[in-house]
Image: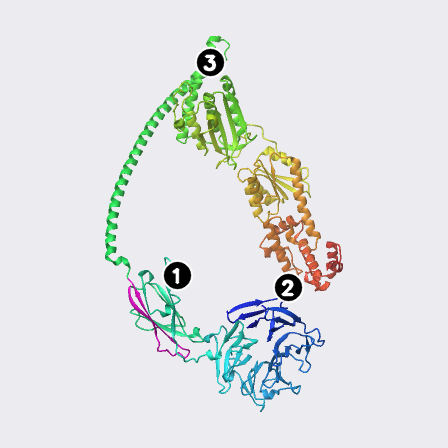
């Protein structure tokens, strides 16, 4: 079966398999000429295919390939419209094609279609050949028949057809009695050719609609008529009319023009707006037949295993079924057999032992049961036909639901066993918990006693320290005065030096003890400031260089960076490093190496103190960080046992760690790891933490017309250095952090930003995010300066939208070149947009935010481009922006005023319309919002350097 469609080519239905194959135009191959099919006719192994406008294709049915295309207009000079409306293959083999301008016939000798002048030159809706060979034509306003024997034809009289002059005949057919039937847009007409009498069937005498599309006769004195409101079966003997709609199984009641077919076994095919239907008229049963109900499936609703269908293929033959307690929720599907309209069948059911009366389901053919109690049931279902007559045949299914296993004696024995086991388990668990609690309480008690003993020891030493601190100070000051005196002899001077050394040691011990106590009771307050740690480490190392030299030790500093600013308590970090230097000098054999390096993520920095002394035993590595602990065998070494505990406590107060780690060649390495930044830190430079002369206030040159560069740098010297260089060519603004920079952006127009990454309050990355996310500033290019030169840091900056990334230390020539390139590139892009008739406004965007802004702006301008009153106020309202904000944004991106941008957009749209060539120049001038054609002409020449007419001629 071949099926033509209006927009999807043709389809072939294989009747044996029920599968469809679609055929559509394929460029470059012999295939269909078009997708809109209006006529199909088979002739032997050939299929004639008629198209809208595109003529006729001939397909070989065996190979399914188009073998030739026929252009109907080629040899018909007077025909203006070659749209095919129908194709008919006569019994003698002649092929006729009805078109909008008459009929063509196929010339077998010359293999072409020629215009048949013997037929009327009007649009032909249908062609029909009756049993005696007359050819009937259905047309608008008339019907025509042609006698092939006499080679003459004539129109039927309108009064004989009993119809209106504006009627249109869509189809014609002949019944067994020789009567002609016509399907028209004003009903169905029966015409007796012998007597000239006619009958008219409309909605007044039973038709569902006056619009009839196609007529097909069956083999039992019926004709079948497709209409705009259902399918009609009309008995030609009794004139009884029966209408079929969705209630009888149709997918739709809306049928289509020129879409019907009867095959050799009597099956009728009708096309609808939702596909096509087919049936054998003998299979259409009367509405009052009995309804046999078939149970199609019983589906178990099992929550654990999902939906499970039991005996779906054979459930109709099952008279009874047994379900366990888990299968007590199910649904039963059923349907009536041997009926053309299954969707209109009325059903009723009852579950014996559950329902007393029949329950009506309407047209639903499924019923659900949930959590049926154990027991025996009988499910009964019956159906009513379209006449609402309930049949006596009842379909039954016996259902038994078994009780759950847990109600059995075995289940109760199991319950008792598990209950006993649970009691024993609970008693055992309670005893175990009590023993664990006793052990825990004992541990707490012992720990408390140890802490009390430790606290008493510390309190004793603290009290003693407070008592002896003042006397030691009173002893040390006179000693220092005596040592400065010239009246002391050499022998006495040596004694005084020895006394001063030991007094200093005692005073250091007292201070360490008091500092350690402060860290324990959180009385040691840290003041985090920005500190250059490399110089601090070098200064601390210098203080221990003389002691190392006296002990024949080689002290080396291994610095991976030349400069590193971190946030620490300077005094606390000095104490940590001093204690670790002191420890290394005391226990080193020949050398000490101190290394400073950063972590891979630049979040922390590490200082390693490595000495080649005797390694600390593994079992003592934790104890050496306990107060007053000394390793046995090292009693001859000076020390108090408080240096490492104090250093670790101070490191932890920095949110860092001090640890003893394994190192190569059995060397000892203490590693201090501290974060680079601290929460709540005060950003100061090393110079600011010490009294010094502040930098003088600097005034920068500002010249009108030069771009303005905003420099964001917390280091004042670095900021002043960059500003001096940049100010030679550009105006300069200076900010100390990202927050100050945002304040400048709200007050001043800025063309470029140079920003450090690590800054207080708001760093460079945060500033970058704020700027690129704000539609008012997103167009401003940003150069990042940083000492963090890793690939990860670069990727982070570039992903956030940085336009350039320069590592510190940097060349000022490189920086200036980068500034110049960024500004000139943006200027070049603006010039390209300004001068090119085809450049899109989005070409000026550098960020996603700018692209969205320009796309919306361009859309609004184009929507209102024909309005001469379009201005910045109207655009600001449509974009929900203030007028100043919109003005600054457009000016910053394009270097144009909004009105200038609107005028350029009008001219670019005009250039686009000129290339299309569909409008006159004066029409284009009005369409793009120019009230004066002369002004449009001069503005176009000024913008693009060529007149509109010449531009269209050269580029079209």
616 sits to left or right of 154: left
Q: Is residue 817 left or right of residue 560?
A: right
In the figure, residue 84 lies in which quadrant?
bottom right
Q: Nearer the viewer, mark 1 or mark 3?
A: 1
Secondary element under disc 1, as helix, strand or loop, is strand
- Residue 27's label in the rendered image is 2
In the rendered image, residue 585 lying in the magenta stretch gets the answer no
What distance separates the C-alpha of mark 2 from that of mark 3?
A: 108 Å
Name, please, the residue furthest toward the bottom. 195
Q: List x then y, in percent, for residue 900.
A: 68, 53
Vertical arrangement, residue 898 with respect to residue 242, above or below: above
- The secondary element bearing badge 3 is classed as helix
Q: Secondary structure at mark 2?
A: loop
Residue 497 has which mark?
3
Q: Nearer the viewer, residue 261 or 699?
A: 261
The circle on residue 307 is 1
Can residue 210 be seen in this snapshot?
no
Q: CA distance from mark 1 to mark 3?
A: 97 Å
- The residue stretch that appears in magenta: 374-402
User: Could you say which is closer to the camera, residue 1 or residue 590?
Assistant: 1
**N-terminal label among 1 and 3:** 1
Structural crowding at the residue carrying mark 2, measured as other residues with C-alpha within 10 Å and reported as few (<14), some (14–19) or many (≥20): few
């Amino acid at each position: 079966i071949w099926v033509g469609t209006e927009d999807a080519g043709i389809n072939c239905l294989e009747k044996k398999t029920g599968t469809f194959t679609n055929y559509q135009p394929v460029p470059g191959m012999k295939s269909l000429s078009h997708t809109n099919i209006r006529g199909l006719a088979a002739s032997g192994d050939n299929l004639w295919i008629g198209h809208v406008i595109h003529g006729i294709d001939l397909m070989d049915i065996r190979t399914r390939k188009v073998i030739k295309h026929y252009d109907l207009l080629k040899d018909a000079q007077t025909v203006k419209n070659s749209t095919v409306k129908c194709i008919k293959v006569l019994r003698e083999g002649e092929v006729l094609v009805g078109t909008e301008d008459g009929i063509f016939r196929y010339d077998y000798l010359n293999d072409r279609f020629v215009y048949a002048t013997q037929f009327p030159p009007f649009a032909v809706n249908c062609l029909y050949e009756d049993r005696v060979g007359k050819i009937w034509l259905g047309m608008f306003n008339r019907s025509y028949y042609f006698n092939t024997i006499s080679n003459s034809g004539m129109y039927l009289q309108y009064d004989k057809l009993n119809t209106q002059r504006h009627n249109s005949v869509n189809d014609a057919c002949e019944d067994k009695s020789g009567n002609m039937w016509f399907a028209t847009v004003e009903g169905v007409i029966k015409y007796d050719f012998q007597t000239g009498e006619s009958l008219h069937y409309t909605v007044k005498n039973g038709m569902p609609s006056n619009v009839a599309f196609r007529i097909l006769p069956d083999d039992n004195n019926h004709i079948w008529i497709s209409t705009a409101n259902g399918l009609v079966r009309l008995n030609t003997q009794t004139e009884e009319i029966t209408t079929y709609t969705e209630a009888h199984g149709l997918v739709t009641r809306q049928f289509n023009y020129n879409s019907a077919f009867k095959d050799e076994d009597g099956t009728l095919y009708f096309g609808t707006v939702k596909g096509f239907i087919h049936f054998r008229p003998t299979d259409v049963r009367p509405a009052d037949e009995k309804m046999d109900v078939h149970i199609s499936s019983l589906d178990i609703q099992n929550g654990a295993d999902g939906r499970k269908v039991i005996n779906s293929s054979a459930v109709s033959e099952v008279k009874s079924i047994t379900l366990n307690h888990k299968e007590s929720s199910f649904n039963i599907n059923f349907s009536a057999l041997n009926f053309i309209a299954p969707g209109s069948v009325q059903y009723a059911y009852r579950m014996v032992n559950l329902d007393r009366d029949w329950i009506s389901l309407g047209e639903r053919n499924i019923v659900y049961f949930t959590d049926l109690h154990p027991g025996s049931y009988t499910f009964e279902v019956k159906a009513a036909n379209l006449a609402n007559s309930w049949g006596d045949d009842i379909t039954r299914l016996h259902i038994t639901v078994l009780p759950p296993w847990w109600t059995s004696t075995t289940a109760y024995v199991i319950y008792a066993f598990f209950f006993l086991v649970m009691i024993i388990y609970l008693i055992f668990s309670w005893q175990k918990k009590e023993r664990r609690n006793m052990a825990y309480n004992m541990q707490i008690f012992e720990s408390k006693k140890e802490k009390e003993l430790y606290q008493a020891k510390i309190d004793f030493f603290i009290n003693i320290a407070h008592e002896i601190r003042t006397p030691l100070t009173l002893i040390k000051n006179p000693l220092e005065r005596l040592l400065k005196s010239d009246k002391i002899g050499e022998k006495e001077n040596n004694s005084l030096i020895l006394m001063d050394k030991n007094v200093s040691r005692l005073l250091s011990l007292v201070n360490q003890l008091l500092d350690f106590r402060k860290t324990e009771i959180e009385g040691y307050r840290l003041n985090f400031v920005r500190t250059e740690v490399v110089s601090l480490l070098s200064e601390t190392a210098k203080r221990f260089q003389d002691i190392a030299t006296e002990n024949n030790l080689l002290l080396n500093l291994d610095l991976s960076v030349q400069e590193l600013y971190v946030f620490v308590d300077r005094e606390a970090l000095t104490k940590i490093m001093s204690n670790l230097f002191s420890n290394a000098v005391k226990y080193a054999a020949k050398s000490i190496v101190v290394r400073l390096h950063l972590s891979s993520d630049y979040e922390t920095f590490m200082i390693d103190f490595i000495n080649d002394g005797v390694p600390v035993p593994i079992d003592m590595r934790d104890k050496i960080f306990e107060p007053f602990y000394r390793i046995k065998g090292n009693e001859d070494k000076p020390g108090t046992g408080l240096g490492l505990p104090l250093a670790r406590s101070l490191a932890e107060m920095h949110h860092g760690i001090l640890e003893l780690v394994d190192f190569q060649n059995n060397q000892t390495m203490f590693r201090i790891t501290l974060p680079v930044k601290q929460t709540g830190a005060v950003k100061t430079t090393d110079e600011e933490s010490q009294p010094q002369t502040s930098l003088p206030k600097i005034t920068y040159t500002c010249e009108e017309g030069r771009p303005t560069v905003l420099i964001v740098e917390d280091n004042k010297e670095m900021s002043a250095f960059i500003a001096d260089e940049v100010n030679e060519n550009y105006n300069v603004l200076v900010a100390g952090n990202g927050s100050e920079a945002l304040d400048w952006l709200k007050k001043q127009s800025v063309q470029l930003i140079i920003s450090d990454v690590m800054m207080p309050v708001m760093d460079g990355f945060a500033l970058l995010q704020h700027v690129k996310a704000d539609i008012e500033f997103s167009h401003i290019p940003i150069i990042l300066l940083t000492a963090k030169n890793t690939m990860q840091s670069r990727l982070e900056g570039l992903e956030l939208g940085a336009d350039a990334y320069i590592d510190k230390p940097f060349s000022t020539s490189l920086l200036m070149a980068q500034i110049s390139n960024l500004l000139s590139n943006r200027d070049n892009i603006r010039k390209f947009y300004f001068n090119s008739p085809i450049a899109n406004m989005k070409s000026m965007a550098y960020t996603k935010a700018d692209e969205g802004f320009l796309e919306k702006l361009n859309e609004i301008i184009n929507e209102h481009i024909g309005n001469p009153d379009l201005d910045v106020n109207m655009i600001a309202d449509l974009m929900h922006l203030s007028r100043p904000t919109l003005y600054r944004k457009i000016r910053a991106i394009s270097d144009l005023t909004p009105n200038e941008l609107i005028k350029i957009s009008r001219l670019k749209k005009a250039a686009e319309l000129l290339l299309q060539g569909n409008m006159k120049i004066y029409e284009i001038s009005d369409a793009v919002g120019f009230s004066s054609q002369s002004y449009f002409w001069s503005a176009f020449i000024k913008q693009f350097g060529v007149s509109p007419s010449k531009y269209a001629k050269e580029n079209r």
